[in-house]
Image (cartoon, coloured by chain):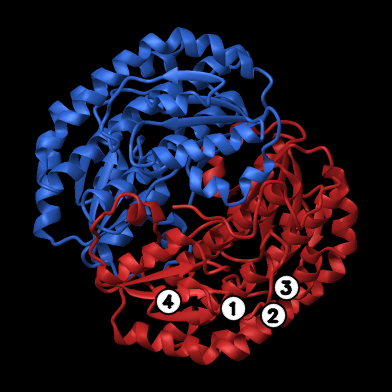
Chain colours: A red, B blue
Amino acid sequence: MHRMRQEIAHQPAAILETLEQERPHIAEVARRLCDEGIRFVLLVARGTSDNAATYARYLFQITNGRPAASAAPSVATLYNADVDLRECLMMGISQSGQATDVIECLEEAAELGAMTVALTNSEDSPICQAAQHVLITHARDEQSVPATKTYTTALAVIYTLSALWAQQADREQYLLRAVEAIEEEFQLEPLIEDRSERYRYMEACVVLARGVNLCTADEVALKLSETCYLVARGYSTAEFRHGPIAAVDEGFPVFVFAPRGPMDADILQTCRALRERRAELMVFSDVPEILEQAHIAVRMPGPLSETCAPIAYVVGGQLLAYHLSRHKGINPDEPRGLHKVTLTR
Amino acid sequence: MHRMRQEIAHQPAAILETLEQERPHIAEVARRLCDEGIRFVLLVARGTSDNAATYARYLFQITNGRPAASAAPSVATLYNADVDLRECLMMGISQSGQATDVIECLEEAAELGAMTVALTNSEDSPICQAAQHVLITHARDEQSVPATKTYTTALAVIYTLSALWAQQADREQYLLRAVEAIEEEFQLEPLIEDRSERYRYMEACVVLARGVNLCTADEVALKLSETCYLVARGYSTAEFRHGPIAAVDEGFPVFVFAPRGPMDADILQTCRALRERRAELMVFSDVPEILEQAHIAVRMPGPLSETCAPIAYVVGGQLLAYHLSRHKGINPDEPRGLHKVTLTR
């Protein structure tokens, strides 16, 4: 069995282990966020970790009422910009803990007055020296180049940090429900494996979601581009209707991730517009009306709290990318030209 | 002649008219930004205007030292999140002034304590009622669905606001140089028209840039998807090397926008990695070493101030999208399924 498939399967256990081992540290960081009167959050990350940052950006705004932004690492590392970061949290995410640009950003941010937190899967890595506070995902060794369990465990840490910072510890039960949902999703794997063969000769596609689930669209698109050598792009359904929908004609492949939530009407409207243009829809959802629009409907476990849903829904996309790569004869563990650690400035 | 082509040609005059008419208002807003002690900037926009927001996000960080973020409109409009926005500027950008989600965001932001500014091409539009301050792009009527002159005039306003807020009025000369560069670019149009035919049957591509020029990659990708019905995606070169580069094999089409600047070494390294994978490169640059990597080299006017370069460089991409759409027999003024004003929540 490929390591990617093993690592996908390890996710429920990895998340539970992360929560068990890391909760006290997360609670401590949440306390410091309150004590230091943090008003703004900046995230810095690359690749899959940047999709975890997108999740954090939505959560910290929706749940914690703090404006939150993805900072471009190049602002600190290549422009040496002098930014006033008092009352800011700068959170750097890097599974390997070796991303030099993320590390430089954290160091720079501390000098500019920020509180800094590193989120990583590598306890003894350089990023742990660079940040004032460190949070660890206990996903154990991830060997496949496409990240899976380091992503979902990072989301679990971010969710818990957001809940504890908001002093809503009761939210944590929703996270446990999302972990159960991942287990239930593995029952859908034969369907996903079977139907993904249809896309053997697909060269490009888009992946849609909305709101806090945008990270899922971006992350599934990244998994598809890494493991299946596609041009795959994630969009929010709103953004997609503002231009890129023009590219859609008969048979255009669209993947939709739509857990029940306040976005249902918007997503349904987009799906209908896509069907009018005769696009092909594969839909992961627990909303019957949205599933009805699909050529291939993957009825997901539910109901889930919408803000936790990204942790469960991405697994469907991971399985899609994994099985499609196998239908294409690609070894998903070692995509051509990629390494587990990419160094950029 | 298509309206899109006329509107591309109108850009130098539109920018100069915008500067002449709007500079006093921009100076007044810059003064208020200082007086109100604005420490953080949030941008809200959709489609092409969101690419202008990306430009603003880099400039306000690099030049003004203010953390700046693109806010997701859905946070305000669909989640009703209660965010503390004291000492924040919320800037909404909408050429039509009718984007309901952007308008709602501005209204909400004012209630949450933010200073609000609308940037629009439509003086009597609803967005002007929603914001405390209004800045107008004097691009006159834009009829072609793909936005061109409303984008570059918006960039010019943002650049000027950033320079005046930083009390560096001497920077404005660089903007005038960028306008001259646009005029010089029209001499490259026969080359771009001729060579773009090569991509008649291209179905997907990526567009790369780095740093403050990321907006150019995103905007050119959007123009290509709107007018040529491609799956086109903009990436920073750093982000691209963290995964999506796996999709690159022989003949994979990549468009690179690389004005001289602190990113040269990074872009050159990416171009070499792409050549090793036998990708096809069309490069818009004034850096000889980067141009040497190209199959099709478009030697751009230079030198330009890197922070102004997006205003000039996007025009090369607009011409590329325009001529490619004509080679494909598409009417670029009226892409299928798009309207000039898209309403989303």
Q: Kindly identify which numbered label has been placed on residue A129.
A: 4
> Which of the pair B309/A336 is nearer the observer?
A336
Numbered disc 1: what chain?
A: A
**Residue at the spot x=22%, y=24% of the render?**
B177
> Which of the pair B272/A12 is nearer the observer?
B272
Quadrant location of the N terminus of chain B?
A: top left
- Whether tag 3 and tag 1 are in contact, CB under 8 A, the answer is no
Q: Position of residue B37 (x, y in %)?
A: 14, 62
Mark 3, Cα crowd under 10 Å, few <14 / some 14-19 / many 20+, is some
Q: In the picture, residue B140 is in which quadrant?
A: top left
Q: Secondary structure at mark 1?
A: loop
Check disc 2 and report the residue beneath it.
A14
Structural distance between the alpha carbons of marks 3 and 2? 21 Å
- Whether tag 2 and tag 4 are in contact, CB under 8 A, the answer is no
The numbered mark, 2 or 4, whose residue comes first in the sequence reads 2
* Viewer can see residue A207: yes
Check disc 3 and report the residue beneath it.
A302
Mark 1, Cα crowd under 10 Å, few <14 / some 14-19 / many 20+, is many
